[in-house]
Every structure is written in structure tokens, then in C-alpha cells.
Image: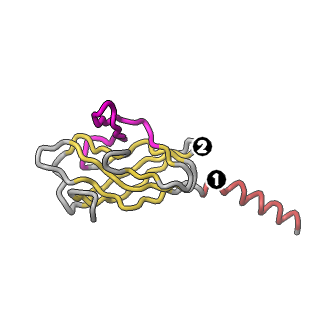
Amino acid sequence: MQHTLILTLISLALSAPAMADNVKIDAPWVRATAPGQKVAGGFMTLTADADMVLVGGSSPVSKHIELHYMKMEDGVMEMREMKEIRLPKDQAVALEPGGLHVMFIGLKKPITEGQKVPLSLIVKAANGKRKTIALEAEARRTSGH
């Protein structure tokens, strides 16, 4: 009996890291665009149940997706591309206007208010395993609901 209990506990301990690879996505939205505009920002809050990193994404509405951050430097707001966005375990990471965000680059057509925009995010776990998360983000003009 004790031998079985020990084996069960070892089995559960070994399987626990495999179960901890989920990312909760709250309030995803994309900024609606004007005709001719070739880029759009994507915003949401991400909470991972283990240390992970957001490493990229894709969407059928754009040629590619980039990860960006904005910061004030010498009185000028600058936007820069990032290779990854860290998602510390159990900490909400806000992707929001004026900060971290997803950029849709090379839009194939304008994104209209109310449109449901498909987006796949790629996250990487500490063990290097990658996972793709599919979601839809509603297009709107501002961050308000």
C-alpha cells in the first residue's frame, strides 16, 4: 500500500509541470483602422499559470505580427519591437495603448469597428515548449467598452 502511494505521488509530481502551461486572456481588442492604414495595435491582459514568454503570433488580417513597447524618451514617445514579452507566473501582464502591445503589420484591408479579428499567440514555457493560443479580438476605436 505504501509503495503504491509513493509511486502515485511521484507520478503526480512529475506530471505537474506538464499541466502548468495555460495562459488566461482577458478583454482582447484591436484598434479599428482608417482606410489605407497598414498597421493596428492589439491589446489584452495575459496571465500565465507558470513562467512563460510571449514570443509572437499571426493573424489572417495582416502579413505578420510583432511585439512592441512604447516609452517616453527625451520628451518623445517611441515605439520599439521586442523579441518577447515575459509572462511571470500568476502575474497579470497588460498589453495596452502606450505600453506593451501586439502590432498587426501589413494589414490586408481595414479593420472595422465591431469586427472579430482572429489572432494566434505563440507562448514559450520555461522548458522551451511552444504553444499556440487562438482567440478573437473585437475591433473598436478606443479602449473603452
| Relative horizontal placement of residue 14, taking residue 52 as reference (left or right) | right
Reading the chain from its start, which is encountered first: label 1 or label 2?
Answer: 1
Q: Residues within 10 Å of mark 2 (few under 14, many from 20)?
A: few
Residue at the image position 27 percent from the left and 62 percent from the top: 144
Query: Which of 9/38 is in front?
Result: 38
Q: Secondary structure at mark 1?
A: helix
- Give the left or right position of residue 84, taking residue 80 as reference: right
36 on left or right of 62:
left
Quadrant of the snapshot with the C terminus: bottom left
| Closer-to-camera residue (7/79) | 79
Mark 1 neighbour class, 10 Å CA radius: few under 14, some 14 to 19, many 20 or more = few
Check residue 71 for magenta coloring: yes
Q: Is residue 124 above or below residue 49?
A: above
Q: Which residue is mark 1?
A: 17
Q: Which residues are magenta?
A: 61-85
**Above or below 50: residue 138:** below
The quarter holding residue 46 reads bottom left
Position in image of residue 84 (x %, y %): 44, 39
Residue beneath the point at 19% across and 45% down: 108
Task: Find residue 13 and report its image quarter.
Answer: bottom right
- Disc 2 is placed on an element classified as loop
Res 14 quadrant in image: bottom right
Whether tag 1 and tag 2 are in contact, CB under 8 A, the answer is yes
Type of the residue with mark 2? Asn
Farthest-out residue, left: 35
With 1 as the anchor, is 33 left or right in this view?
left
